[in-house]
Image (cartoon, rainbow, N blue to C red):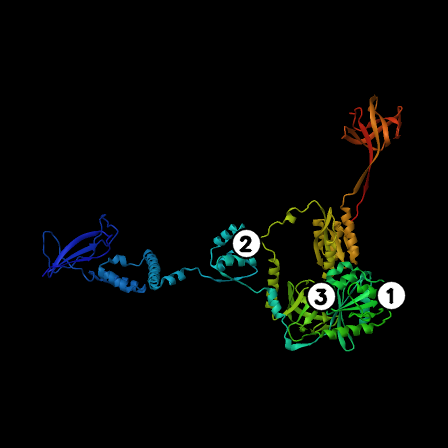
């Protein structure tokens, strides 16, 4: 029988070996190769050999000395101490969940000291376990890929397309995180577009959307605050009921708008307005013939264009008041334009028909030019001839309004959440911010949470147009509300929401959207880069009683244009003049204007100490006149120069006590001792100064006229030459007005 040789190799090929033993057992050759089990030398500096020796059954020598042996199944245990240590090592391995490995190691003959659990071994084992785990995952993935088709592998390698939510403003870092992209890649992409940004740079929604698409993801724009609000405003059709009409009274200043309303509501409002002109939007509700009507009184002055526009947008019917003795005026035409732009019907009230010079027919003819045709002229515009003084035909005016309202068939939802429009706002010393609103949909109740523009609040009190506290306000009702967290802006919407959290969130989102409406990555425009910064500026601080007045003043000031001086509004706010306003006026060298408000005691005292003037006014055009006056003071005066006489130098003389004297002949005009003169040589001005002395035949004189010869001295100048020209002139300065 052919003999076979079996090689048993323990360990890896990279290890060193101590000895090779050849054993022959039962006709078989076995080569036992023992690896070096310890990397550390012993005390003598030699390698530490294995702790066990192979067990042999039989051996023979075939040309070499060798000890036949067989691998032992377990290491020898010499005493009780080593047995106890071995038990402890097994327990340690079992605690680590590796008992099987422990057994194999023991069978292989590993040294007992290597089985001790140390910190270094624990850490190395953890690293090895993690490496093994990662490797096993990789192997599993490779095995899985082997079973996949080529198409499936390519599909798995494709980049993941993600849905990315995009708010109105987002930083580069946040956008990169949402796309699962590196921030550096996003910055590099923007840099390639010529835009330099940082990781914390805020991007506008449109820019972010473009980047998401370029990186292969799906952008999802979140709902804006306005979209959410529009959903809340959605009317429930099943609850529609008739509501009172909202009527806006418009027209030229002093044509009797407020007087007509006074008679209708039996109140005297005109006496409460300074200068007899309305400077606020007033809202009232009257009841006539079992019908309720809500009236909005708008100012007629040219500065209150915004108020009239706001009133026309809110209204259902416009009552155009025209004085029969005055005719159609600029604000009358403007009111017609506002009404037509809002697409609302117009009822013309021709007022002051009781006056002797009243001509209603003339008014009707003038209105024809603006496409308002009376019914008696085969038109469709209702025109009523009235008199607020004698109460003539006021009942017919109300009937005409009710008729128009019936034609319109005005209905709204009474049960839904209340919505409305802010007409006016102010800050009351005792009550805080107060907003005048008109409810357009739903019923406003005490305790409701609401949003108005960038403000929010809880309705603490509802006050009607008669000054009574009420618990709820139906549609078309004009009311004042308390509880807003700041002065609302006139014209802002008013919306009731479910709770405080929703009100706060919507308000904050609106504020953020308003802030980020401008792209943060802005560049200087041509106009801003080349703007004229040489113009003088008049700094203004304006405090007014209501937001509408403040708005009207700002708009009127913006219309004041001049090349050399311009007004600059540093602050335009509502409420009384405070110490802060005075301090700001001093720091900015500003003009402090109080419109319909008074300064506090502290502010008044501080203004006196700092010598700051607080200009108080009650009529808007007086404010504008004062601002123009102050701007005129910054203008350089208009300087005019007039040549009064010229003289030709013929000879140069020296006179004791006077120095050089220019012997001259006056060619035109006259020269006096008070004249300013120029020395002109070869067409160039050599010197400008004043006349010193005038001589006529060695006598001093005060004046020399045309054709006369004289001697002239000029103060601080003696370098005369023949044929020089002495030109006398006078300068006049005139203040300029805007």
Above or below, 684 against 616 in this view is above
Q: Position of residue 592 (x, y in %)?
A: 74, 53
Image quarter hosting the N terminus = bottom left
Above or below, 692 against 410 in this view is above
- The residue at 90%/65% (across/down) is 356
2 or 3: mark nearer the eye: 3
Residues under labels 1 and 2: Cα distance? 68 Å
- Circle 2 — which element? loop
Mark 2: few/some/many CA within 10 Å (<14, 14-19, 20+): some
| Residue 455 appears anywhere in the view | yes
Q: Position of residue 422 (x, y in %)?
A: 69, 66
Residue denoted by label 2? 201
Residue denoted by label 3? 342
- Circle 3 — which element? helix
User: On the rendered structure, is 616 left or right of 155?
Assistant: right
| Residue 577 appears anywhere in the view | no
Q: Position of residue 516 (x, y in %)?
A: 60, 58
- The residue at 80%/44% (across/down) is 735
Near-viewer residue (626 or 39): 626
Residue denoted by label 1? 359
The image quarter containing residue 365 is: bottom right
- Specify which label sits upstream in the sequence, 2 or 3: 2
- Specify which label sits upstream in the sequence, 3 or 1: 3
Near-viewer residue (302 or 210): 210
- The residue at 89%/64% (across/down) is 357
User: On the rendered structure, is 80 left or right of 516?
Assistant: left
Q: Position of residue 675 (x, y in %)?
A: 84, 33
- Circle 1 — which element? loop
Residues under labels 3 and 1: Cα distance? 29 Å
The image quarter containing residue 319 is: bottom right
């Amino acid at each position: 029988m052919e003999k076979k040789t079996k090689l048993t190799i323990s360990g890896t090929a990279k290890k060193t070996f101590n000895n090779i033993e050849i054993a022959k057992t039962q006709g078989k050759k076995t080569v036992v190769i023992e690896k070096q089990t310890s990397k550390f030398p012993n005390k003598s500096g030699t390698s530490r050999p294995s702790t066990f020796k192979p067990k042999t059954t039989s051996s023979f020598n075939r040309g070499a000395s060798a000890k036949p042996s067989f691998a032992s199944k377990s290491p020898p245990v010499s005493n009780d101490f080593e047995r106890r240590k071995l038990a402890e090592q097994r327990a340690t391995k079992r605690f680590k969940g590796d008992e099987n490995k422990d057994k194999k190691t023991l069978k292989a003959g590993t040294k007992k000291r290597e089985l001790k659990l140390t910190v270094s071994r624990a850490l190395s084992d953890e690293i090895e376990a993690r490496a093994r785990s990662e490797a096993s995952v990789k192997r599993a993935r490779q095995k899985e890929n082997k079973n996949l088709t080529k198409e499936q592998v390519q599909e798995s390698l494709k980049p993941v397309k993600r849905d990315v939510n995009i708010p109105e403003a987002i930083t580069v870092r946040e956008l990169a995180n949402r796309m699962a992209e590196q921030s550096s890649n996003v910055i590099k992409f923007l840099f390639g577009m010529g835009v330099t940004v940082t990781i914390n740079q805020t991007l506008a929604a449109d820019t972010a959307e473009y980047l998401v698409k370029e990186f292969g993801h799906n952008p999802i724009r979140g709902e804006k605050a306005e979209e959410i609000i529009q959903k809340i405003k959605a009317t429930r059709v099943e609850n529609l009921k008739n509501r009172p009409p909202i009527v806006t009274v418009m027209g030229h200043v002093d044509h009797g708008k407020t007087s007509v309303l006074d008679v209708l509501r039996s109140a005297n409002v005109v006496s409460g307005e300074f200068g007899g002109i309305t400077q606020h939007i007033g809202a009232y509700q009257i009841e006539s013939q079992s019908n309720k009507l809500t009236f909005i009184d708008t100012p007629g002055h040219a500065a209150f264009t915004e108020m009239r526009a706001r009133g026309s947008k809110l209204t259902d019917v416009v009552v155009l008041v025209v004085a029969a003795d005055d005719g159609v005026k600029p604000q009358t035409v403007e009111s017609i334009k506002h009404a037509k732009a809002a697409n609302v019907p117009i009822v013309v009230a021709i007022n002051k028909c009781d006056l002797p010079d009243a001509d209603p027919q003339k008014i009707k003819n003038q209105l024809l030019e603006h496409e308002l045709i009376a019914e008696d002229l085969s038109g469709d515009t209702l025109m009523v001839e009235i008199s607020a003084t004698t109460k003539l035909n006021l009942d017919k005016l109300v009937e005409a309004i009710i008729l128009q309202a019936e034609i319109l068939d005005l209905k709204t939802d009474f049960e839904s959440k209340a919505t409305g429009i802010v007409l006016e706002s102010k800050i009351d010393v005792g009550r805080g911010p107060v907003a005048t609103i008109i409810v357009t949909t739903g019923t406003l109740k005490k305790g409701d949470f609401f949003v108005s523009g960038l403000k929010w609040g809880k309705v603490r009190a509802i006050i009607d147009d008669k000054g009574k506290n009420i618990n709820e306000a139906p549609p078309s009702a004009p009311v004042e509300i308390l509880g807003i967290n700041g002065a609302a802006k006139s014209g802002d919407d008013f919306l009731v929401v479910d709770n405080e959290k929703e009100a706060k969130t919507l308000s904050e989102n609106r504020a953020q959207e308003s802030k980020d409406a401008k792209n943060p990555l802005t560049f200087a425009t041509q106009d801003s880069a080349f703007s004229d910064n040489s113009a003088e500026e008049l700094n203004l601080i304006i405090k007014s009683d209501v937001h509408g007045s403040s708005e009207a003043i700002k708009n009127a000031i913006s219309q004041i244009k001049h090349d050399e001086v311009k007004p600059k509004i540093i602050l335009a706010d509502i409420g009384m003049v405070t110490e802060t306003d005075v301090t700001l006026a001093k720091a900015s060298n500003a003009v402090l204007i109080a419109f319909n408000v008074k300064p506090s005691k502290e502010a008044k005292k501080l203004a006196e100490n700092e010598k700051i003037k607080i200009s108080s006014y009650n009529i808007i055009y007086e404010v504008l006149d004062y601002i123009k006056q102050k701007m005129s003071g910054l203008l350089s005066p208009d300087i005019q120069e007039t040549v009064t006489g010229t003289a030709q130098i013929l000879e140069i003389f020296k006179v004791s006590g006077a120095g050089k004297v220019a012997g001259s002949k006056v060619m035109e005009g006259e020269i006096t001792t008070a004249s300013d003169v120029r020395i002109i040589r070869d067409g160039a001005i050599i010197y400008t100064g004043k006349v010193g002395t005038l001589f006529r035949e060695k006598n001093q004189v005060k004046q020399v006229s045309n054709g006369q010869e004289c001697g002239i001295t000029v103060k601080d100048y003696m370098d005369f030459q023949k044929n020089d020209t002495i030109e006398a002139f006078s300068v006049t300065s005139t203040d300029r007005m805007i």
